[in-house]
Image (cartoon, rainbow, N blue to C red):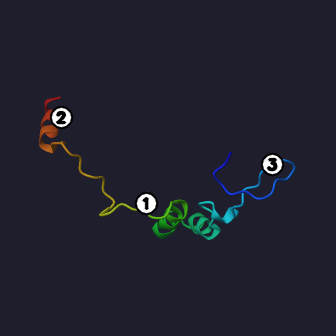
């Protein structure tokens, strides 16, 4: 049993009544742009949006406040670590 609406059966097989274009990640123009320039942040974002569910699955290409640096670690004490490195 499936949760997808189906059309008539073809030799006992159910055919899903869903347009293949509804599947995520089907926009060929985005893939062309990424092949041309893999570092294109707009194309990366577009691919993430194309592959995500509306409003519930934010694309991984977006990080609020991201300036390209790793996030600061909570609990990491640079001074204490530098002192440990000198003692070693």
Check residue 85 in the rendering and tell me which mark sits there, or answer none: 2
Quarter of the image where one finds residue 32: bottom right
Q: Is residue 45 above or below residue 1?
A: below
Crowdedness of circle 2 by 10 Å Cα count: few (<14), some, many (20+)? few
Secondary structure, mark 3, is: loop
**Front label number (1 vs 2):** 1
Quarter of the image where one finds residue 17: bottom right
Q: Nearer the viewer, residue 19 or 41?
A: 19
Q: Write the residue at 87% across / 49% down.
A: 11
User: According to the image, label 1 marks what residue?
Assistant: 58
Q: Write the residue at 47% across / 70% down.
A: 42
| First-in-chain label (3 vs 2) | 3
Gap between marks 3 and 2 measured at Cα: 67 Å
Secondary structure, mark 1, is: loop
**Front label number (3 vs 2):** 3
| First-in-chain label (1 vs 2) | 1
List x then y, in percent, for residue 21.
Answer: 67, 65
Q: Write the residue at 43% across / 60% down.
A: 58
Location of the C terminus by quadrant is: top left
Check residue 13 in the rendering and tell me which mark sits there, or answer none: 3
List x then y, in percent, for residue 1.
Answer: 68, 45
């Amino acid at each position: 049993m499936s949760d997808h609406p189906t059309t008539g059966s073809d030799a006992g097989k159910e055919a899903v009544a869903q347009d293949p274009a509804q599947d995520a990640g089907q926009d060929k123009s985005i893939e062309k742009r990424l092949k041309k320039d893999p570092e294109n942040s707009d194309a990366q974002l577009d691919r993430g949006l194309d592959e995500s569910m509306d409003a519930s699955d934010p694309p991984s290409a977006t990080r609020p406040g991201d300036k390209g640096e790793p996030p600061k670690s909570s609990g990491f004490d640079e001074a204490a670590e530098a002192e440990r490195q000198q003692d070693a």
